[in-house]
Image: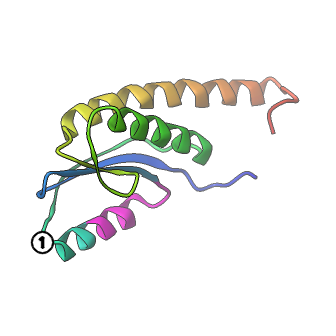
Amino acid sequence: MATDVRHHLYVVKFSDDVVKVGYTGNLKARLRTHRTDARSRGARATHYWASEEYERHLAQQGERALIAWCAERWPRAWGSEYFAGADAQAIALYAADVEDELFAAEYALYRAKQNGDPQVA
């Protein structure tokens, strides 16, 4: 199903030494929600990184890559996307590499559509 909504990958570092990774179709609202949630636990959002916009399935793919990479390096704080003691800068650098892969995948999809590839909807 095609959609006009584009999605960002993001990384948020909190003052309680927790880092959240994810993707969203509304970056501004998502960051506002994370700031509010952080305050409810006595923390604050201190830094964030966000990617360019991508189709949802590519952003989901990028999020899975970020979560897997983080899970190999740091313990989960809670849920599947929050990591305790994680290095936000290292995650953002890795996320930028993931973003390069997403850009290449999106460009390949665009080219296939332009060339009339019947496998691309």
SS for dot 1: loop
Main secondary structure of the magenta stretch: helix
The amino acid sitting under disc 1 is Gly
Lateral position of residue 80 relative to residue 103, left or right: left
Residue 37 horizontal/vertical position (percent): 27, 71
Q: Which residues are magenta?
A: 24-34
Which residue appears at 12% of the width and 71% of the height?
Answer: 42
Q: Nearer the viewer, residue 53 or 59?
A: 59
**Residue 28 within the segment the image draws in magenta:** yes
Residue, x 25% and y 73% (percent of image)? Answer: 36
Q: Is residue 37 left or right of residue 41?
A: right
- Which is nearer the eye, 19 or 74? 74
Looking at the image, which is closer to me, 44 or 105?
44
Q: Which residue corresponds to the image point at 33% horizontal and 29% vertical from the top-left?
A: 94
Residue drawn at x 26%, y 39% is 74
**Badge 1 density bin: few <14, some 14–19, many ≥20, Cα 10 Å:** few
82 to the left or right of 88:
right
> What colour scheme does the image use?
rainbow
Q: How many marks?
A: 1
Q: Is residue 40 magenta?
A: no
Judging by the rendered image, the residue that carries numbered circle 1 is 42
